[in-house]
Image (cartoon, rainbow, N blue to C red):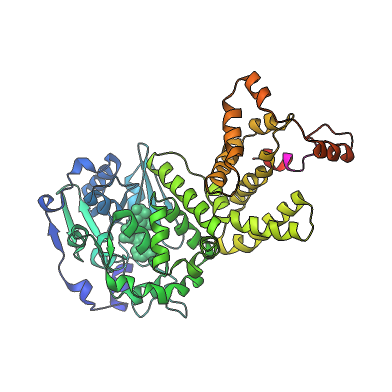
Amino acid sequence: MIRKFLRRVFRRDDASLSHAPATIPVARHGIRRERVSPGARRTCEALQQAGHKAYVVGGAVRDLIAGIEPKDYDIATDATPEQVRGLFRRARIIGRRFQIVHVMQGGETLEVSTFRAAHDAHTAKDEHGRVLRDNVFGSIAEDAARRDFTVNALYYDPASETVIDYHHGVADLQQKTLRMIGEPTLRYREDPVRMLRAVRLSAKLGLTLDPAVRAPIREMADLMQNVPAARVFDEMLKLLFSGHAVECVKRLREDGLHHGLLPLLDVILEQPLGEKFVLLALAGTDARVKAGKSLSPGYLFATLLWHEVLAAWELRKARGDVPIPALYEAMEDVLNQQGEKLAITRRIVGDIKDIWALQPRFEKRAGKSPYRLLELPRFRAGYDFLLLRAESGEIDMEISTWWHDFQNADPDGREALLIADSGPKKRRRRVRGKKAAGEGDPLAGAASEG
Ligand code: ATP
Ligand code: MG
């Protein structure tokens, strides 16, 4: 009923909605149903048996055709969220603005969304043309038209093994081109995050940006300023954890998108040491993604912001501040400046600080200090970070080699590696009072938390 009413109110005769889609047989796209996850197959089947349309949609179809294992599966259907929930034992409706259903099948979670209507003159937008609400049910043709790129608007039916293609997405994918559905400048205005998606998806899939997709990005990059920070943060994480972060950053710079978009990249990539450090960190992240290892946003953001911390720390030391408190203040400065812009969550801020705060402790290679450092839960992250600093030329390799040896040595070997405490350090410790060496370390608490 709602749909009928809306169709009457929002009647549109957009060409993209009126043309018939191509139905592409398996011989041309190559996806046999066995390649689709069991959960996605079962979910489509159950919906279809109940008389609904149901397709695997979006990134999963695109990735399967491109020969990449999909991260997750989205299902699109004409069933309403309540109808979907009613069909599955383990399903819950999530989201307030636009409801989608999470259906649990075995260990999988499938995201099932009801076809959404395209935007038109009545859609609520901000003064820059950014779409504020996107919560009206529609037809499959409308659902296809509101997606961003042609390669993302493919609907795969496991039952018939056909792909429904309204926008020549299969051909674009086979020709390795990322093309926008509709007019790119308008689509970027509706949602500036699509610029970031263009770069990420082209890097991930090895696609060339259609000139019409690429050309406006440089001029329109400023529109990213109007996007809520939490959304930019989510997209940034997707990009940085895509397994193609180095390639993405390279493309972002080529397209002038690192300006304004990611202020921290701006600052960092312009410092000679910072650039090497960040690129090494991103290459390390890419390798971890490819090896299927866990990823920590805190660690990554700690690397992205480190050279700003170093710069702020140097300034404070140069004006005579005591080194360790100066480091803490520099950390606060940088996090206050960037934290808000990047919507870094509180939990991540804690992780970031822990990693930074550990760094000066690696310089102490005498007495009990190295043993204590080794026991900290954050030691591994701190050490990996130290390695990056050494590899990028910020600090002497000798320190990271020492820590490598120290970790791997037996008790006697460790004892032998300890560097005799130097005179001035001892004097300073005595001045501080009765505490045993190292116990007065202001970083001990912060670093061991978490
Ligand atoms: P991946 O999952 O590999 O990161 P994806 O394309 O699947 O890439 P998702 O964020 O999972 O990205 O989005 C799923 C689908 O939703 C997309 O394929 C696309 O059809 C649609 N979509 C996502 N974001 C947008 C957007 N900003 N504008 C229009 N359509 C979008
Ligand atoms: Mg996806």
Q: Which secondary structure is most common in the magenta stretch?
A: loop
**Which sits in the foreground, 7 or 378?**
378
**Residue 82 can be seen in this image:** no
Quarter occupied by residue 169: bottom left
Quarter occupied by residue 9: bottom left
**Which sits in the foreground, 231 or 125?**
231
Quarter occupied by residue 163: bottom left
Screen quadrant of the N terminus = bottom left
- Residue 369 at x, y percent in the picture: 72, 32
Identify which residue is drawn at 61% across, 49% down.
352
- Residue 292 at x, y percent in the picture: 40, 39
Residue 381 vs residue 195: left or right? right
Residue 448 is covered by the magenta coloring: no
Identify which residue is drawn at 54% across, 56% down.
274
Screen quadrant of the C terminus = top right
Residue 427 vs residue 326: left or right? right
Range shown magenta: 440-444
